[in-house]
Amino acid sequence: MYDFHELLYNLKNEKNLDVKKYLPDKFAKLGDWRSTPYLGELLINKEETDIIRIECAESLGKQGDFNAIKYLKKVLNDPNPEIRRTTIWSLGQINDINNVNYIFELSTDEDLMVRRWVAKSLGRLKSDLSLNKLNSYLKSNFHDDDKLVADIIRSLNHLHDLIPKSKSHHYLELSYSILESNKSKFVKQAASILLFNILSMGNEPNAKMLLSLIEQCPLNDPLIRPNLIKSMGFSNEVEKIHNFKDPIKYQAIGISHNIDLLTQSLSNNSDPNEILNILKGFEYARHYFNYDNFINHSDLNIHNQALKLYALNRSPIEIIIDSFNENYGKYNALEILKYYGDHALKIYEQSSFSTDKMARQISVKAMTSLIMYKNTKNKSHLISMLNKISKNDVIWHIRRDARNGIEYFNSLN
């Protein structure tokens, strides 16, 4: 690991730009917030090269120190659009509600990439204020570049759980209108996901319109058609898609809680893709038992999904641990151990401080989920682990996820 004082000396004295430009990222890997004022001063120093200033802005965002905000605010109007863009990105990484307004100041920026990063960063800051700003942003930019519109709708999807049921009808109408428009396929894909998310809140879909939209999609369309078919599961007319060739129809059938039809479809079915989607359908239907025979399936995706159903059914933990130890679906097993509360803490503790980056990343996110589960009693130890990770991990976004877990815990108390 890097030494803070050595890095600081080099940051102050290095003359070779090709060497110096890598130093801010080394501070980001170190994650020592003592670097904030030094990086911040370089960022706001207009005599410094833009390459170094951009690297400093990014490093401040990766480290997530609230004290970095005062420096980032000062360069929001910098003439270099790359500095503005990076600053917007960094403000979106620091979970302070005040950053919403700072970010939105650049919603009318002349540079399209800056405006796109305004949309993306607002989606990272989960608050009612972010949601309101995104709604305003979409309204004023609906006829702007489709890439920007798609980014705004994707961010609305990130915040959809903040949308009150009483106001959800607006988003249904928005989704339908976009899907019927001549917007690009990427805008429509984002709208189809938004439609599914809003319907999952308990809203009734327009089955006739959905079927019409599905018919307009090519059979091999991977972006829009699958989300529309899944959305049919919230209707009372799911039988109208039963003869579709799309395996994802089984997830829609699961959403409709038609267990008999799923069970019938599973019997004597040898198509791996169909089996996988049927098992996912059972997950949507919250029907978690009687699928243990698929745990030993040779198809890894089927094994993983069957193991998830097994875990959701709160079956004995040993089979999950065996899958983790035998490296067959290791990361899936690690992720679903969260359903076992305190019984998973020891494994998460080992994985969180291992050399396996993916295992650490999964463990931190799973530990955040553990906070909300009733079968997690030892939350003080859980928070202690997250606190260590937030200070010591060499990967900036793992430290960020650990901080987010701690902030979530604090919001509940």
Image: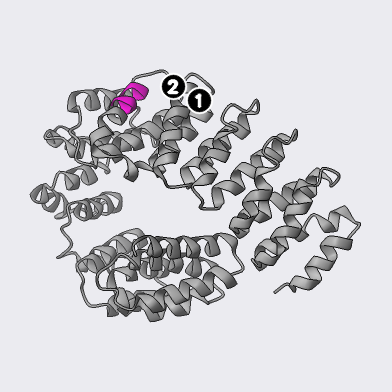
- Magenta segment, prevailing SS (helix, strand or loop): helix
- How far from the left and from the top, in percent, is residue 29? 66, 65
Q: Is residue 280 left or right of residue 359?
A: left
| Residue at the spot 54% in from the left edge and 64% down from the top edge | 399
Q: Which residue is mark 1?
A: 146
| Above or below for 395 versus 322 | above
Q: Is residue 140 left or right of residue 282?
A: right
Q: Which residues are magenta?
A: 173-179
In this view, the residue in front, 170 or 261, is: 170
- How far from the left and from the top, in percent, is residue 252? 21, 42
Tell which residue pokes out farthest to the left in this image: 260
In this view, the residue in front, 348 or 33, is: 33
Q: Which residue is mark 2?
A: 183
Tell which residue pokes out farthest to the right in this image: 15
- How far from the left and from the top, in percent, is residue 272? 29, 54
| Above or below for 173 versus 22 | above
Q: Quadrant of residue 112?
A: top right
Q: Amino acid at mark 2?
A: Lys
